[in-house]
Image (tube, helix red, strand yellow):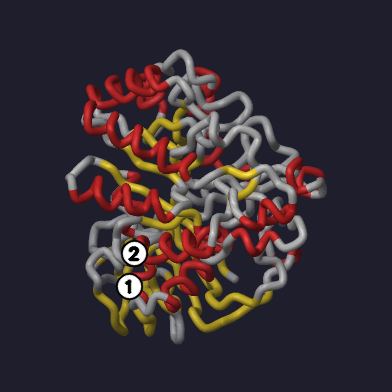
Amino acid sequence: MRLHIKNGRIVDPASGKEGAGDLFIADGRIADGGKADRVIDAKGLVVAPGFIDLSARLREPGYEYKATLESELDAALAGGVTSLACPPDTDPPLDEPGLVDMLRRRAKALSRARVYPIGALTMKLEGQALTEMGQLTDAGCVAFSQANVPLADTQVLWRALQYAATFGYPVWLRAEDAWLAKGGVSHDGEVATRLGLPGIPPFAETIALAGLLELVRATGAKVHVCRLSTAGAVELMRRAKQDKLPVTCDVAVHHVHLCDMDLGYFDSLCRLEPPLRSQRDRDALSRGLADGTVDCLCSDHTPVDEDGKHLPFAQAEPGATGLELLLPLTLKWGQAQRLSLAQTLARITSGPARILGVAAGSLRPGAPGDVVLFDPAAAARISPETLKSQGKNTPFLGYELAGRVRCTIVDGNVVYEA
C-alpha cells in the first residue's frame, strides 16, 4: 500500500529534523513522493519513526499462561513499538536454532511488529557450555545474552567474549555479581532495612561491570550492558566510552522515574530486576541518559500473571509490563530533562536501532516504512482495562500519562489504529 501522511509534525531523531510536512511510504519504504492509495490526515499529531525496544519478553515458548505472542505484539503496536528484541529466558531457553526459527516464523505469520531474537550465550543459560553462536546467528539471532541469569564463572565469560570477538557477535549482558546479589530483592538501603527486605548493594553492579569492562579491554568484544541501575555504573560507562571501548548500555524506563521509596508498604508491582535504587541513582541514570553516556531506554517488558505478583514482596515474581508505557514515560523523562522532542525520541528510535544493527529508526527516503503517529498532549489514566498486554503488572497503575499512539505502520502497512 502507498501511503501519504499529511499535515503532521514530522520528527526524525536520526537527522535531528523537526517541522511540519508530509511523509510518503511506498513499497514498504519511506519515499520522496508519489501517488497514494490512502491519505492519512495527521493534523495535531507527531509523525516519527516506529519505536525500537531492546528488551520485551513475549513469553513464548513456555510461559503462555503469562502472555502470548499475539497479546504482546498487539501491546507493542498499541505502544508504537515496531521493532523489538526478545531475551532468551524462555522455556526452553533460545539455545537451539530450531527454537529461534520457530519463534521467528510465528512472529512473521502474525504480521505485526518485527521481532529480533537474542540467543542464549550458554546452553540452557546454565553458564557452563557455550551455545553454537554461528548456527544461532544463521537462524536469526542478532546478539547473545544470559538475560537475568548470572554467569558466575568469569573464565566462561572470558572464553565467550573471545569467541564472540573473533566472529563479531554482539554480547548483551547485565552487570551483577551473582554472590553479592544472592537472595537480595531490593536496593540495599534505608528502605530495605526498614521493611526488613534482603538488599542488593549497588557495588554488586559496579564490581561486575568493572570486571566486564576489563574483559572487553582484553578481548575487544562488542558488549552492550543491559539495565544499568546505579550512579557508579554510569560513571564506569562514561570512562569506558572515553577510553573508546566498544561498549553501549541502556536503562529500563521505570528506573528513570521510580526509586526504592516507591516500594511503599511492600508494593510487589515495584519488585523489579535490577531493583529500584536510591533517588541519587535514579537522578544519575536520568542525567547519564540525557548526556549520551547511556545510549537508550527500553521497556524491559516482563508480563507476569496475578498469581506471580499477589505474593509477599520477597516471593513475588520480578518484572513490569512496559511496551504500552514506553512512549508516555519517555516523553515525561524528556520534559523533565528539558530536551527537544527529537532528542527525547532518539532514545527509543535511532539509539536502539544502532545497537540492534538495523536500518530502522529513521525517516530518510529508503528507510523501512515503520512509522508511528501520536498525540503528545493526549493523556490517559493507566488501568488494567487500558492495557492490551496480558500482563497488567505495572507500578504506574492509576497514573495519568500524556502521549497516546493513534496509528502504527509497519513495513508500509497500517497495523494499528486507535
The label shown at residue 81 is none
The label shown at residue 346 is 2
Give the quarter of the image for residue 30.
bottom left
Give the quarter of the image for residue 349.
bottom left
Residue at image point 25% right, 45% down:
240
Label 2 amino acid? Ala
x%, y% of residue 16? 24, 71
Mark 1, residues whose alpha carbon is within 10 Å: few (<14), some, or many (≥20)?
many
Q: Give the residue pinned by disc 1.
A: 342
Q: Secondary structure at mark 1?
A: helix
Mark 2, residues whose alpha carbon is within 10 Å: few (<14), some, or many (≥20)?
many
Residue at image point 48% right, 58% down:
81
User: How many callouts does the rendering have?
Assistant: 2
The correct choice, above or below, for 66 with respect to 24 in the image is above
The correct choice, above or below, for 389 with respect to 95 in the image is below
x%, y% of residue 246? 23, 40
x%, y% of residue 5? 38, 75
Mark 2 and mark 1: Cα distance apart in space: 6 Å
Q: Nearer the viewer, residue 272 or 170?
A: 272
Residues at discs 2 and 1 in contact (Cβ within 8 Å):
yes
Give the position of the C terminus as an image quadrant: bottom right
Give the position of the N terminus as an image quadrant: bottom left
x%, y% of residue 26? 32, 61
Q: Taking 57 as reference, is 29 left or right?
A: left
The correct choice, above or below, for 259 with respect to 359 in the image is below
Give the quarter of the image for residue 395.
bottom right
Residue 95 in view in this figure: yes
The correct choice, above or below, for 129 with respect to 139 in the image is above
Which residue, as the protein is rendered here, is positioned at the far top? 129
Label 1 amino acid? Ala
Residue at image point 63% right, 31% down:
61
Q: Taking 72 as reference, is 265 left or right?
A: right
